[in-house]
Image (cartoon, rainbow, N blue to C red):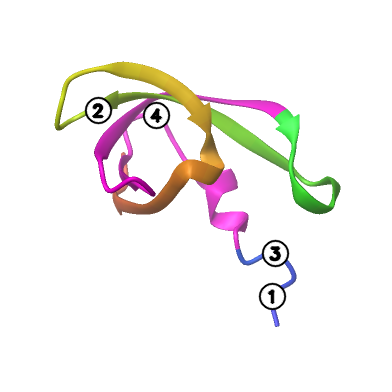
Amino acid sequence: MNKDKNAWRKELKVGDLVKMKTGHLAILTDVYMRFTGPNGSEYPHVKILYCDDQSTGGCSAWRVAEVLNEAR
């Protein structure tokens, strides 16, 4: 079994359309390493533009539920 089932979060890119765990849709405007996650692994933080209410913010990539459309 894959030891890190959440490793896909390390592949997030600027421009990705994602669904947040809250159910909101967002576009990633910045992706940067900021902290150490579970088991000593590094995970990125992201800056986002919410598509459904146009507000901006930032958070841990752990709040991203899934990638809906990858940026090219």
* Whether residue 6 is situated above or below residue 37 in the rendered picture: below
Name the residue that disc number 4 marks. Answer: 14
Name the residue that disc number 1 marks. Answer: 2
Residue shown at the point (74%, 43%) measured from the top left: 37
- Residue 62 is left or right of residue 57, and the answer is right
**For discs 4 and 2, the disc positioned in front in the rendered view:** 2
**For discs 4 and 3, the disc positioned in front in the rendered view:** 3
Q: CA distance from mark 4 to mark 3?
A: 22 Å
Q: Is residue 72 magenta?
A: no
Residue 4's label in the rendered image is 3
**Position of residue 72 measured from the top left corner of the image (x, y, whole percent):** 31, 40
- Residue 23 is left or right of residue 28, and the answer is left
**Position of residue 56 measured from the top left corner of the image (x, y, whole percent):** 31, 16
Q: Secondary structure at mark 2?
A: strand
Circles 1 and 3 in contact, beta carbons < 8 Å: yes
- Residue 13 is left or right of residue 19, and the answer is right
Q: CA distance from mark 4 to mark 1?
A: 26 Å
Q: CA distance from mark 1 to mark 3?
A: 6 Å
Circles 3 and 2 in contact, beta carbons < 8 Å: no
